[in-house]
Image: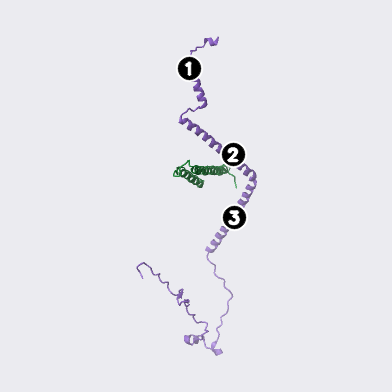
Amino acid sequence: MLINPVKDFISKASIHAKEDKLKQLNYMEAELIMLEEDVIRLKMNGLIPDSMNYFQVQINELKRLVRKKKGAV
Amino acid sequence: MIAEEDEYELLPRQEVENLKKDIERLKKNPLGDLKEGETLLESINNLNTNIQRLIDIFAKAGADLEGEYSEASPVEDIKSIRGQNEQIAEGILTVADMLKEMKEGMSVSDQPMPSPRLGPRIPMIRPSFESAGQPSPQSYMETPFPEPGNLPDDFPGAIPPPPQPFIGVGGEQIGRTPFEAPMPEKRRGLFRK
C-alpha cells in the first residue's frame, strides 16, 4: 500500500480533533451537572423559591444541546 | 547649551497631573472601558486558546504519523506490489491464450465438415424365412395388433396411468396433476363471493 502523508495527516488530525471536542463536551456536561446540584442545594436552603424553575429549565436545555453535539461528533 | 536653545512652554500643574492619570489608566486597560474593547480582548483570548488547541492537535497527528511511518517499511510494500503485479500479468496472459484458442476453435468449426469416413462394408444377407418354417416379415405386417384387453398385466409396452393427485388427510386434493392446466386464481374482492 502506497503512503499518502497529507491524507494520513489530515485523517489523524481529524481523529484527534474529534477526541478533543468530545473531551470538551464531557467537561461542559460535568459542569452543568455541578450547576444543577448547586441549584438544588440553593433551593433546599431556601435561597431560591421552589416555584422558580428558570435555572432548571436553562440547565436542562444546555444539557440537551451538549448531548446533541456529542451525538453529532 | 542645547537645553537652553529648545523651545518650551509652561503647562499648568493640573494639566500635567491629568495627563499622568490618563497614562496610568491606559497602561492598566489599554483597550479602554468600552464594551467593544472588552469583547475584543475576550475574542483575542479565545483565538489564542483555539490556535493553541489546533497546534496541539497537529502536533499529536504528526507524532502519530512519525510512529506509523517508522514502523512501516516501504521496501516490503513495493515488493508485495511487484508480486501482485506479476500475478495480474500472468492472469492476463492466460486469458489472452484462452481467447486465442477459442478463436482458433471457432474458425475451425466454420469450415465445411468433411464427409464421414466409410467403414468396412458389411454384406447384407436376407434370411430365408420360408426355408426355416417361420413366417415372413410381410406376414408379421399383415397380422393385426392384439387387443389391449388381452395383454398381460406385466406387459412392458403398457402405458402407465397418469399420476393421481395426492389426497390429504381431510380428503382434500393437494396439488395438481401435471396434465391439468393451471386455473386462473379467483379474485377475492370485498363484494364478491
Q: Earlier in the sequence, mark 1 or mark 2?
A: 1
* Amino acid type shown at disc 2: Ala
Q: Which class describes the residues within 10 Å of circle 1: few (<14), some (14-19), or many (20+)?
A: few
Looking at the rendering, in which quadrant would you find the N terminus of chain B?
top right
Where residue A56 sits in the image (x, y, percent)?
47, 44
| B78, above or below B123, in the image | above
Q: Is residue A20 above or below residue B126?
A: above
Query: Which residue occupies 48% across, 31% down?
Result: B38
Alpha carbon separation for disc pair 3 and 1: 99 Å
**SS type, badge 3:** helix
Q: Amino acid at mark 1?
A: Gln
Closer mark to the observer between disc 1 and disc 2: 1
Amino acid type shown at disc 3: Gly
Q: Nearer the viewer, residue B185 or A63?
A: A63
Vertical side of B57 occupied by B176: above or below: below
In which quadrant is the C terminus of chain B drawn?
Answer: bottom left
Residue at image location 49% in from the left, 16% down from the top: B13
Residue under label 1: B14
Question: What is the secondary structure assignment of the residue under circle 1?
Answer: helix
- The residue lying furthest to the bottom in this view is B133
Secondary element under disc 2, as helix, strand or loop, is: helix
Which residue position holds label 2?
A: B59
Relative height, residue B103 to residue B80 (above, below): below
Quarter where residue B90 is shown: bottom right
Q: Among the chains, which one is purple?
A: B
Instruction: Quickly name the residue at label 3.
Output: B91
Pointer 2 or 3: first along the chain:
2
**Host chain of mark 3:** B
Residue A49 circle label? none
Instruction: Say which of marks 3 and 1 sits in front.
Output: 1
Front of the two marks 2 and 3: 2
